[in-house]
Amino acid sequence: MTEITGAAKPLDVITIGRSSVDLYGQQIGSRLEDITSFAKSVGGCPSNIAIGTARLGLKSGVVTRVGDEQMGRFIREQMIREGVSVVGIATDKERLTALVLLAVEDEGVSPMIFYRTDCADMALSEADIDEGFIASAASIVVTGTHFSREASDAAQRKAIRIAKAAGGKIVFDIDYRPNLWGLAGHASGFERYVKSDHVSDRLKTVLADCDLIVGTEEEIRIASGADDVLGALKTIRSLSSATIVLKRGAMGCIVYDGPISDDLEAGIVGDGFPIEVYNVLGAGDAFMSGFLRGWLRGEALKTCATWANACGAFAVSRLLCSPEYPTWPELSHFLDKGSRHRALRKDADLAHLHWATTRREGADELLAFAIDHRSQLEAVADRLGVDRQRIDGLKVLAVEAAARVAKGRSGYGMLLDSTYGQKAFPKAAREGFWIGRPVEKPGSRPLDFDHLPDLGSHLVEWPIGHTVKCLCFYHPDDPPELKERQERELLRLNDAARTVGRELLVEIIAGKHGTLDETTIPRVLTRLYDLGIRPDLWKLEPQKNAAAWRAIEAVIRDRDPWCRGIVLLGLEAPEKELVEAFRAAAATPLVKGFAVGRTIFAEAAEGWLAGTMNDEEAIADMARKFEKLVAAWRSVRRTEAA
C-alpha cells in the first residue's frame, strides 16, 4: 500500500462535523438521574478524531462551528493544546455550543442526553468550507450526522468536491445517531439503530465518492438500506470501490479491500486485545484515529486494523472520550510490551505515560518567586504585633514584584499558599505565571498535610493549572518507621494528584537531618521511584558539586525520562551562596531554574509588616532581588552552554 500523505500537503487529515462539550458523570454504575458531578471534555465524532489523530502524530484540522461563549472557547483552546489546526472552526454568534450529558450505568449501557437544538455545529454551511484549507489536507473525514440537514449536508459535499479535485482522499465515518436524525426521543441518545429509508437514501449518495468507509454493523446497514450485514456490505461494494472497515466492538474489525464474498469473515483482520470494557462511548472515534494513523502513512491494512483495535481498547478501558485516547508513545509502548492488566486504566506505566504525554505544555525554564511560607511569616507578624491577615497583602505585592521582572514573558512562576495566598492567586494567573501550592503542614516531620485529611476532594477544587507542591524532610538513613510513614503520605499525595489531574512537585530536603553527599539525593530519588512516585517536577536543595547533580540527573533520566526537571531551592541562603549553587547546577540540563523565597522577600516582609516600607518600596525591593537572581542564573547558564 502506498503512502497517502505527502510533503506537498500541510495537513494529513481534516475532520468535518460535530463539536460538543461532553459532561461525563463521574459516578460509575449510576443512573444519569443520580449523577452528582461531571467531568468536562471535548466531544463529537469528528472532533474526537481530530484530537485522536493529532495525538498519534498526524497533522490534523477540524471544520466545525462553536458558540461565542465559554464552552466554544474551551473547545477552541483545547484543540490548540492538542495540536489540531483551528483554521476551520467558525464562531457562531447566534447559537450555543452543543452539550452532551453522559453516564456509565452498566457495561455497554451509557445513557446520554444531547443538547443540540439549533446548536452551533449543526448550522455549518457551505460558507464555512474554505477551499484553500480543505485542499491543504491529504484526506478529509465526513461524518453521517452532518448529512442530516440540508445546509450541513451541502457543506460536506462541497468539501468532498474540493478535496477530490485537489487529490485528497475521502473518508466516511457513518457515525449514525438515530435521534440526531429525529428518529428517537431525547431520552434515547444511546440508541444505535432505527431503520429509516430516508437516512439510507441520503447516505447512499455519499458512498461513490469515498476511499474509506468505516462503520459498525448497524451503521453499515443504515448506509446501505439492507437488513443484514452481508447484504449491506455487498450493496456498499456495488456503489463504491472504497476500502470498507466493519467495526465489531469487542470482536475487533474486518477490512474488505476488494469483492465481498459470501463469507463475512473473509476479510483482513488485525490483532485483538482482550481487555475489560469500562465505557464504550468514544471507542469508535479512537478506533478511527488508530486506523487513519496507519492508512495515511501507507501501512498494511492488517497493521491499520491492529492499531485501530489497540486505540479502541484504550478508549473502552477509560471513562472519557478524547482525553483518554492514546498518544503515539503510549500506543507504541502498549504494542511493544502489552499490559498485564485487563483494565488498562490500572496499568501504572501506561497511566504515567498517558499523563506525561498529554499534560499541558510547560516552559523550558522555570524561575519562581517562592512566597508560600506560612509559619515564618506568621512568626514575623506575631513578633511585630501585626494582624496575621496582613500577610495576604504582602503576597499580592510579591506577585506585582515578580510581574515587574517577568514583563509578560513565559518561564516565570510563583509558589503561593492557600492560607494567605488566596488574594494573590487571581493576579498571578492573570500574569500567566506557573503556580505551585503547598499541601504539607509547615515543618512537619514526619510529613503531615495542612488541614487536608482528604486530599482528593480538596485538590479537585483547585484550578487545573495549579501544581501541587509538597516539601518532605526525608533522608535515606532515617529510621525505618519514619521513612515508612513519610513514604505512605507521599504515595497518598501522588495518587491524589494523578486522580484529580493536577501536576505534582515534590521538594526533598535531606541535608537538615543527615549527611548530604553525592549519593544522598540519588538514593532518595531511587527509593521514591521504586515506590511508584513520579512527580512532574523535583525541587532540590543545593548540591556539593556538579558531580552530585550529574548523579541526580542520571537517576531521573533512567527512571522517568518524561520528568519536566528540577528547580533549585534557596534555603534562605545569601545571594552569593545562591550564585555558587547555581553554578554547580547549571551544567545539568534537567535543572530548569530555581524557586527561591526568603532571600528575596525577607527584608521587604519585615519592613512592610512593620510599617517602615510602603507598598511601592516593598515591591521595588523584592523585584530588584528577584531580578538579580534571574540575571545570575542566566549568566551561569550561558557560561556553561558556551
Image (cartoon, rainbow, N blue to C red):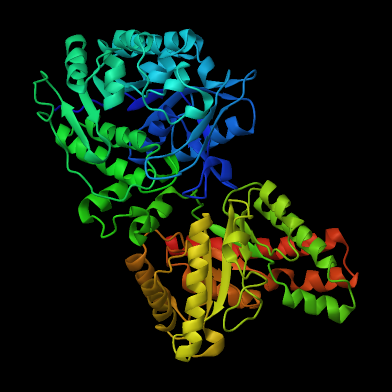
Q: As displayed, is residue 582 above or below residue 121?
A: below
* 173 left or right, relative to 178: left
Residue 31: where, in percent of width, then height?
A: 51, 43
- Which part of the image, by quadrant, shows the C terminus? bottom left
The picture quadrant where one finds residue 467 is: bottom right
The residue that appears at 51% across and 52% down in the rendered structure is 363
Residue appearing at x 30%, y 45% in the figure = 313
From this view, report whether residue 632 is shown above or below residue 143.
Answer: below
Provide residue 332's location: percent of width, then percent of height: 26, 49
Image quarter of residue 551 = bottom left
Determine if residue 541 is in view. no
Q: Nearer the viewer, residue 460 or 15?
A: 460
Left or right position of 524 against 259: right
Picture coordinates of residue 179 (x, y %)?
A: 46, 21
Q: In the image, residue 155 lies at what x, y percent? A: 44, 11
Note whether 235 is above or below 557 in the view shown: above
Going 57% across and 53% down the picture, which residue do you hit?
Answer: 411
